[in-house]
Image (spheres, grey):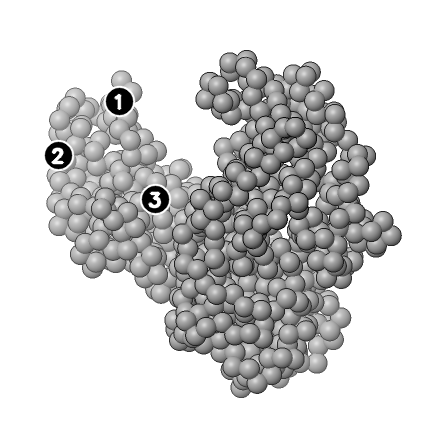
Amino acid sequence: MNDLPYLHGETLTKIPPLGSYLPQVQKGVVTSWLSGNLSPPDWVLCPFGSSPLPALEMARAGFRVLIPVHNPILRFLIKKQAAPPSREALNSALVTLASSYKGTDRLKPHLLSLYETDCPQCGRKTSGASFIWNRSSQELVSKICRCGHCGEKTAGEAAPADKEKAREFSSRSPTYARALTRVTSPSDPIRVQVEKALASYPPRSVYALFTALNKVAGFNLPDEELSNLEVLLLHAFSRCSQPLVSTLQDEDADSLEEDTYREENVWFAMEDALENWPDGAQSIQVTSWPESPPEGGGIAIYPGRVKDLIPQLIGFPIRAVVMVYPRPAPDFWSLSALWTGWLWGQEAAAPLRGILTSRDMDWPWMTQAALVTLRELSDALPDQTPALGLMPGIETSSLLSWTSGSLSAGLTLENLAVDPDHHQGQSRWTINPLSKPVSSQEIDHRAVIRGAGMAALQSAGEPAHTLSLYSAGMAGLAGAGYPPADSRMAEAGDYFPRLVIDFEENIAYRQGFLHYSNIESWWHQEMALDPTPRSDQVEMKLVQSLVEGGGAVEEKQLYQMIYDAFPGLETPRAGLIEACLVSYGKRETAQLTAWSLKPNDQPASRIQDLQEMEGIISAIGTGLGYQTATQNMGGNLTLVTWDENGKAAERFFISASGLLSKVINNSGKDNGNGWIILPGSRAELIHYKMRYNPILGDIIQKKWKLIKYRLLRRLREEGGITKENYQERLCLDPFTSDSPQLPLI
């Protein structure tokens, strides 16, 4: 394996359309990878078609992207996001819908009246935004209102009138029957899955959605205006489905109890599309395969399964493959069939029948699906085709599934890097390599997993996340030539289940591994902490980058510098980089995406601080009658001792950094004890290190006390320190945060 850096990407600040159901990849990763491998207008294949965003990003960067998309909903998303409607166009569509009639009433007031309630704040009639139901009892329990009269957003208990209004709608109504019939016939084998998907909607939502849908179906509008109305409807479909409740990204979602679900106001859900649909992005051309997009970049969609496309790829100039690994998502596929039928009828939903009849859509199934797809794909692609495998939402099961499926399909793993904090993984592969690891003897894969786990911890010098150890294990197995070419296990679909057992039994307590479940990290009982663990190395590298930058440095450039310095399996957690950045850096006010070194962290300033702190603590000791001595420990670390009758009474380590391991390593046997004097701006960074290195945290908590620079300055000015009170006075400003605290006197 090669040590290649994790590629920095921007986390999306706003959930994209259907984002709660789709793989969430970071922006900029695919174009960064492609820039080192290809040049526009080269062809890139996205074989799994599981996420629109990477394909759109590549096309906007000038590449031509071929993507098979079996799901009509995803095809619609790609086309609409390739040429996104403006907010004005969506609002115009909403106005058209609002002004249509339901009987003698305009549609908007009719739909809003379905949710009419009394405002908990002012008591006047308003349309409720959401209604909270108890899932077990199916009782309406509370409501959330955005009152048009008092302007307040409030929550309150559901009144008897609210419950009575909700009971006016039934799952046995003609509307419910039409909602099913529009997707499938009563005798269709997939009707059970469709019924399950429909059951995710409260009866009132079904009535409101179909009332709006029927109006749209009756409009005689140009295709573009009609598709804008479909955008509004699709957004409401996804927003009003109960499974979405647990993933809502707003301030109300956290207040929901586990056994509740939220019924959304359908009209407000359609209005919500105006704020959540992307606006202003560069338009790109989308064609239907085999029509080619222009050389300036675009997307060719194959409207079917990738296995049907593969024979057409033989001899076609695919230069690279970008795989956004999919997750088993039976609920999403069932909802997709429902939404497809609602929007475009039974015939449009028919291609989804095959996947809906799959009985076991789980990780073993997904592993086998990836294996078969990638093996067939390899037969159609040239030798040495580079591939990027993005692993969004990564956890141990998905990591083992995606890597094992790809390895057993014959791909060669070139690099693997994960970031547990952003739940992202990046793998690099070669399809049809000229040579690949071959084992000359039977592999003791359990020993490989254990050895790789221990090597990962040894390299880190401190506890590491479960994903880091599992990644090291999979990389070790890949390097050892696993699975063997004659393995029957992969053919039988047993590769994934066997791996799960192997990892659970070998990264385990019985093998000497210690599990810290609250932070999902591991250590080994035979190891000692490294005096310079990776977290300290990352801190030093970030400070070096800020110093050498001389001024403002772009955030993405800083992150990439760190990833370049710690590539592959050594990739540090984003949370650690952020903690270091906040501790040492300040955002540029005129350039919020850039950072510079804080003025008081400039090297010359910190040298003065160290000298000042040395002078203060020495003067305090002398004033109390102690003999003081100073020792330069190297690396901007100073030791001041207070001696009495030839014996050390107190030891003070003065540092400008958060390198606590260095202090402990220089303190003698048994990790010493004493005081550590630090800048207050290191507080959050030190708390991060103590949390994610519980061994270090335990040593600090039991044997050391931390003092802030500013407390020593204050004590110098206040005076009044005696042998009886100095320990209490030195603890007046606890090292809990960088906010000033009043002395507890």
Query: In the visual, does 449 lie left or right of 644?
Result: right
Q: Secondary structure at mark 3?
A: helix
Q: Secondary structure at mark 2?
A: helix
Q: Residue at x 14, y 35 (%)?
A: 616
Query: In the visual, does 367 lie left or right of 716?
Result: right
| First in sequence: mark 2 vs mark 3 | 2
Disc number placed over residue 334 in the picture, else none? none
- The quadrant in which the C terminus is found is top left
Please state the horizontal and vertical placement of residue 608, each as a whole percent of the image. 12, 45
Please state the horizontal and vertical placement of residue 40, each as a whole percent of the image. 41, 74
| First in sequence: mark 1 vs mark 3 | 3
User: In this view of the protein, which residue sits in the foreground, 419 or 265?
Assistant: 265
Please state the horizontal and vertical placement of residue 54, each as a whole percent of the image. 49, 62
User: In this view of the protein, which residue sits in the foreground, 513 or 503?
Assistant: 503
Q: Residues within 10 Å of mark 2 (few under 14, many from 20)?
A: some
Kind of residue at disc 1: Pro
Instruction: State whether residue 27 is above or below residue 482.
Output: above
Residue at which label 3 appears: 685
Kind of residue at disc 3: Leu
| First in sequence: mark 1 vs mark 2 | 2
Q: Residue at x 58, y 56 (%)?
A: 76
Q: Residue at x 17, y 45 (%)?
A: 599
Q: Secondary structure at mark 1?
A: loop
Q: Residues within 10 Å of mark 1 (few under 14, many from 20)?
A: few
Q: CA distance from mark 2 to mark 3?
A: 29 Å
User: In this view of the protein, which residue sits in the foreground, 661 or 133?
Assistant: 133
Residue at which label 2 appears: 619
Query: In the visual, does 342 lie left or right of 608?
Result: right
Please state the horizontal and vertical placement of residue 376, each as a whole percent of the image. 66, 77
Residue at which label 1 appears: 743
